[in-house]
Image (spheres, helix red, strand yellow):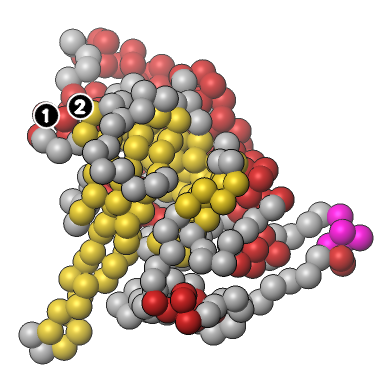
Amino acid sequence: MSEEKAFVPNPEYLVQVRHLKEYFPVSTGFLKTTMLKAVDDVSFDIRRGETLGLVGESGCGKTTVGRTLLQLYKPTAGEVWFDGRRIDSKESLREFRRRAQMVFQDPYSSLNPRMTVADIVAEPIDVHRLCPDKKAREARIRELMQLVGLNTEHATRYAHEFSGGQRQRIGIARALASNPEFIVCDEPVSALDVSIQAQVINMLEDLQAQLDLTYLFIAHDISVVKHISNRIAVMYLGHMMELAESNELTKHPLHPYTVSLMSAVPIPDPRESRKQRRIVLEGDVPSPLKVPSGCPFRTRCSRATAQCSDACPALREAAPGHFVACHHI
């Protein structure tokens, strides 16, 4: 994660993000505009076939990272490299959008209520002209619906006729329609019942093994992220705080923010749960319109010193494969 003077893509990684920034202008008064720094200098890599989990509090910029990565938002600054190619032209973007898709958080609002399930699932097929004729299109729709556990007889129905879990399966089928290699899963189970969450998570894992998919899995539930992810990245107020292998980060968190997050995860064993010390952070999350100088976490950190207010710590390798952004680690 050290800074590169001349970046050279690594073929080991399918997705490489460098110094990504996404700022939104927000009106703060008469003819006054302040930049909301939703994502501020974020860098990470995703290996082929792995799942990178992205966790953090609501409003920390997780979803914006996913949407900016897929160019749904135009990046304010930074680079996105996919399969060794920088996404910086219309041609590269069109190919990238066929090979990279998104599963949205809300299965209720992400599906067009005026379209049948068949038309929703086939939308990427039509946009990218992937089927030569109507017969092939219908066969592909049936194949996709079976792949995500939906009854093909439901193809002529509308989205409002389905449950939340079924609607999310429709959204996943749509994401798979263009034969993508990379999928951004933006809190795909947060709006579902717990029993349905497990079914969808297991299905995503099966699809990954079957289709050789690579995931960026965004969520605020660390337990879910730990289950599905190979590595986990922790965000706070638009910045990357920590990045490590899933087991390493959950068992040996280094950043004070990650330590606090992990202390809040329930332990099913009552004896172990009684031994656990809950770390409660002081104060509230600062407004992204007024991010503290230096380290964004310093106003709530027990280790904060004058150095923390002077400079924002860079994400550096504190242990093999374990990156952390803290002056005191």
From the viewer's side, name the closer residue of 53 and 270.
53
Give the structural element (helix, strand or loop) at label 1: helix
Q: In the drawing, what numbered circle is on residue 91?
A: 1
Provide residue 110's location: percent of width, then percent of height: 33, 48
From this viewpoint, is residue 166 visible?
A: no
The image's mark for residue 95 is 2
Asked whether the viewer can see residue 319, the reply is yes
Task: Name the kind of residue labelled 2 in the image.
Answer: Glu
Residue at 11% across, 35% down: 89
Residue at figure coordinates x 69%, y 73% from the top left? 279
Q: Which amino acid does label 1 sit on?
A: Glu
Marks 2 and 1, how far apart at CA: 6 Å
Residue 136 picture location, percent across and down:
27, 10
Reply yes or no: does residue 40 show up in magenta: no
Q: Which mark is residue 272?
A: none
Q: In this view, does 300 lie above or below 169?
A: below
Region of the chain picked out in magenta, as a range: 269-273
Task: Locate residue 167 relative to residue 92 in the image: left or right.
Answer: right
| Quarter where residue 93 is shown | top left
Up/down of 29 relative to 207, above or below: below
Mark 2–mark 1 CB contact (< 8 Å): yes
Q: Tell which of 133 and 285 is nearer to you.
A: 285
Residue 270 on the magenta segment: yes
What is the secondary structure assignment of the residue under circle 2?
A: helix
The front one of 193 and 293 is 293
Estimate the x, y position of residue 309 in percent, counting from the top left: 42, 79
Crowd band around label 1 with a 10 angstrom C-alpha radius: few (<14), some (14–19), many (20+): few
Q: At 17% across and 20% down in the image, what residue appears?
A: 129
In front here: 79 or 180?
79
Point out the image quarter for the C terminus: bottom right
